[in-house]
Image (spheres, helix red, strand yellow):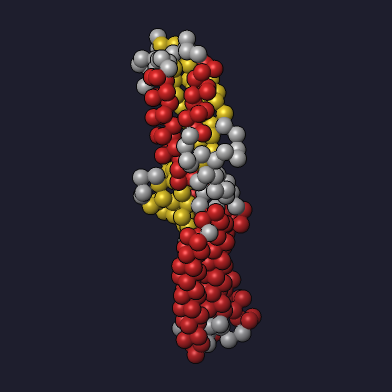
């Protein structure tokens, strides 16, 4: 055995292995209990669901990282040996497994920089969905088709992430519609606004905007309508969009407002 290997081997106190294992087991049980507790608390206080999930994510992150560090630290005979060898191991780990190390560091940055949080509806590359968990190494996102995508945290450092609600429960939704350019736009605005207000998922504490723009596609000249309204929770985004579209189509038909042919 070389002198370096012997030095590392002799620095460990193997009588404390059981204590380190107990700490890790307790931390794992506490993390699972926090998750169960946060789920129950979110169901009891739905208005604070995102805040509860965000706090519990931070608590679990600190609990896991702290317990692992403590469990490793207890295995050394002295603080000096712990810091010296831990530094050497950390350097070797950073060089040999730089992708994992980058993800660990990125996890800390993502969690505390708060560019996005648990519960946010985000768009990253071609992924669009809700952030379920921000872990030590990766972030889990549930897409709108109910698929779970796991993204290494290091990828968020090099690409932009768009958060639709930025930690809030409500979220702005855009609904795009088209009508003939000769339509009565004042009536169209009234009908679109009424269709939005009639929805049970609309958030009326924030403004509703109806915007118009004339456009040309090929030989077609038409007016584009963009409705901007907020829903009370991100989960209602697509149902609100579908509901408003159906109401507007029915209202346009009843009032003789025509859709330009060939646009859809």
The residue located at (49%, 24%) in the rendering is 191
The x and y percentages for residue 263 are: 38, 18
Q: Is residue 80 left or right of residue 151?
A: right
Is 204 situated left or right of 217 in this image? right
Residue lying at 49% horizontally and 20% vertically, measured from the top left: 188
Residue 54's place in the image compared with 79, above or below, is: above
The answer to whether residue 128 is seen in the rendering is yes
Residue 11 image offset from top left, x and y in percent: 55, 84
Report whether 25 appears left or right of 85.
left
Estimate the x, y position of residue 118 in percent, counting from the top left: 52, 54
Front residue of 80 and 138:
138
Q: Is residue 217 visible?
A: no
- The picture places residue 234, in percent across and down from the top left corner, at 49, 45
Which of the image's four quarters has the C terminus? top left
Residue sticking out furthest to the bottom = 15
Residue shown at the point (55%, 54%) measured from the top left: 47
Q: Is residue 38 above or below residue 126?
A: below
At horizontal 52% and vertical 23% (from top left) the residue drawn is 190
In the image, 191 versus 168, the foreground residue is: 191
Q: Nearer the viewer, residue 30 or 72?
A: 30
């Amino acid at each position: 055995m070389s002198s370096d290997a012997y030095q590392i081997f002799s620095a460990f106190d193997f009588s404390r292995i059981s204590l380190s294992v107990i700490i890790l087991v307790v931390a794992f049980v506490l993390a699972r209990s926090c998750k169960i507790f946060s789920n129950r608390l979110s169901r009891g206080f739905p208005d604070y669901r995102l805040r509860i999930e965000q706090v519990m994510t931070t608590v679990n992150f600190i609990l896991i990282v702290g317990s692992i560090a403590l469990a490793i630290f207890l295995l050394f005979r002295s603080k000096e040996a712990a810091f010296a060898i831990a530094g050497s191991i950390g350097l070797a780990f950073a060089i040999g497994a730089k992708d994992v190390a980058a993800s660990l560091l990125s996890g800390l940055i993502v969690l505390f920089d708060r560019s996005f949080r648990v519960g946010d509806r985000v768009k990253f590359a071609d992924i669009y969905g809700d952030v379920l968990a921000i872990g030590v190494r990766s972030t889990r996102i549930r897409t709108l088709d109910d698929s779970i995508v796991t993204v290494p945290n290091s990828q968020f450092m090099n690409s932009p992430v768009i958060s639709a609600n930025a930690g809030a429960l409500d979220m702005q939704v855009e609904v795009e519609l088209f009508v003939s350019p000769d339509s009565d736009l004042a009536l169209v605005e009234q009908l679109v606004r009424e269709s939005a207000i009639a929805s049970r998922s609309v958030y009326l504490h924030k403004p509703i905007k109806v915007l118009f723009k004339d456009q040309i596609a090929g030989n077609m000249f038409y007016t584009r309508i963009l409705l901007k309204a907020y829903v009370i929770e991100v989960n209602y985004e697509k149902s609100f969009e579908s509901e408003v579209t159906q109401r507007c189509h029915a209202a346009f038909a009843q009032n003789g407002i025509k859709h330009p042919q060939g646009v859809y």
